Amino acid sequence: MRTLARPKNRYICQECGFESWRWMGRCPGCDSWNSLVEEPAASFAPIGAGDKKRAIPLPLTEAHCLESARLKTGLEEWDRVLGGGLVPGSLILLGGAPGIGKSTLLLQVAKALGQKTGKVLYVSGEESCGQTRMRAERLGCVLPSIYILAETSVEAILAAAVELQPVAVIIDSIQTVSLEEVQAAPGSVSQVRESASRFLRLAKDNGIAVVLIGHVTKDGFLAGPKVLEHLVDCVLYLEGERHQSYRLLRAFKNRFGSTNEVGLFQMGGKGLEEVLNPSEWLLAERPAGVSGSVVVSSLEGTRPLLLEIQALASRTAFGNPRRLAAGMDFNRLLLLVAVLEKRAGLPLGSYDIYLNVVGGVEISEPAADLGICLAVASSLKDVPVGDRTMVLGEVGLAGEVRGVTQPERRIEEAARLGFTSFIVPETNKRYLQKNLPDLDIIGVSTLAEALKIIFRPH
């Protein structure tokens, strides 16, 4: 009888998760040196072996729906990004730069859950219980329903969670905990993967929502193996400049909701405060009567955000003009500049062009194309666009202006903030005039028509 050969030990890169059957000094996946660590081969049994309880398939129509059982925290920005709240039995990974506010946010989430839902277990592998209590007092998050555990042993954490049966468990952070049976240092590829797998089983078997805090590398990616992101149900990133007050919460993976939603917070003395009216906050410091400034509307999931686009066109001092974009795709800027030169006849070949989306928000949808073009043209001609004017439209290579989705919702948000004039695609104007007859809506079919409107004498 032929027996299966025992698998050899593997070598796994601690930077990118690349696997090899032999040791190499340099990882072929990420070109890092001395990053491959030996991992013992796992023992396995033939199919059907063991005395585990037999799994029984269940018809999809009989499966219990968890939508109504979501754990709503009352933090609207957090609940919106998750798709309506925490799903019982889900595993969530929250990443972000050091000092950005990950622990602060989750301590506030623990407070909200403790007040409305039930017990919450907060596990800190980086702080003592006293240090966590001191931080909780500063944030006003001291509640008897929040249980603190300063522990790095995964086995001890699992035992405490099963005994306590909380509604949620927060692990701060996954890189600091370890399993005794895995012969590797905490934070290594094998430790992070196996520890996350145990927390996944805790979540699924007991119906407990588990939130993991994950460290990031110097490039801004989540540290540890890539399988960690595949393992969890939701991957969240807390973004923002450490020395600025705003924070953006985004979902890059969400099995229970949309990944297009964004939550906006502001760091204050009492922790992260929700910004319930982000459009007004983002436009609060917009200068009046300055050329190169245009307001556009970007849909982040179901929420329209009014964003200021600033452009600066200055004559270049070198042979090749420079292009720089912050907050949008650089190649998209090059494409729109080429359309302005070819279809609108603007002499941009001898000008440096700098573009910035104010507030640190990224624009990915093409509905801001017309606003970008008008901002560049406004800076070039030094003619300001109206302070109460909002611009919408996608620009094609032929210079045509194409319609955008959900224009009514975007314009209603702008009208609520005091905007009175709207430059929109002609295809959207006919629909909008029927539903918003009291607003000044100007329809354009080409980029040249839009330029004539902003350059005409007032």
Image (cartoon, rainbow, N blue to C red):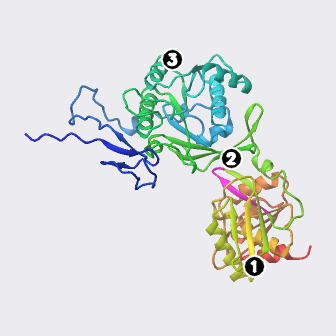
Crowding around mark 3 (Cα neighbors within 10 Å: few <14, some 14 to 19, many 20+) is few
Q: What's the residue type where badge 1 is placed?
A: Ala
Give the mark count: 3
Q: Position of residue 367 (x, y in %)?
A: 67, 64
Mark 2 vs mark 1: give the one in front. Answer: 2
Task: Kindly check if marks 3 and 1 are in contact, taking CB atoms under 8 A apart as contact.
Answer: no
Residue sitting nearer the eye, 286 or 326: 326
Image height check: is 412 above or below 265?
A: below
Query: Which one is earlier in the sequence, the residue at label 2 or at label 3?
Result: 3
Mark 2 vs mark 3: give the one in front. Answer: 2
Q: Is residue 429 visible?
A: no
Crowding around mark 2 (Cα neighbors within 10 Å: few <14, some 14 to 19, many 20+) is many
- Quadrant where the image shows the N terminus: top left
Residue beneath the point at 25% across and 35% down: 44
- Marks 2 and 1 sit apart, C-alpha to C-alpha, by 37 Å
Q: Determine the secondary structure under disc 3.
A: helix
Q: Which residue is mark 3?
A: 164
Q: Which residue is mark 1?
A: 448
- Quadrant where the image shows the C terminus: bottom right
Q: Position of residue 363 (x, y in %)?
A: 66, 58
Q: Position of residue 291 (x, y in %)?
A: 85, 67
Relative horizontal placement of residue 54, taking residue 116 as reference (left or right): left
Residue closest to the far right: 458
Residue beneath the point at 32% across and 43% down: 10
Q: Which residue is mark 2?
A: 240
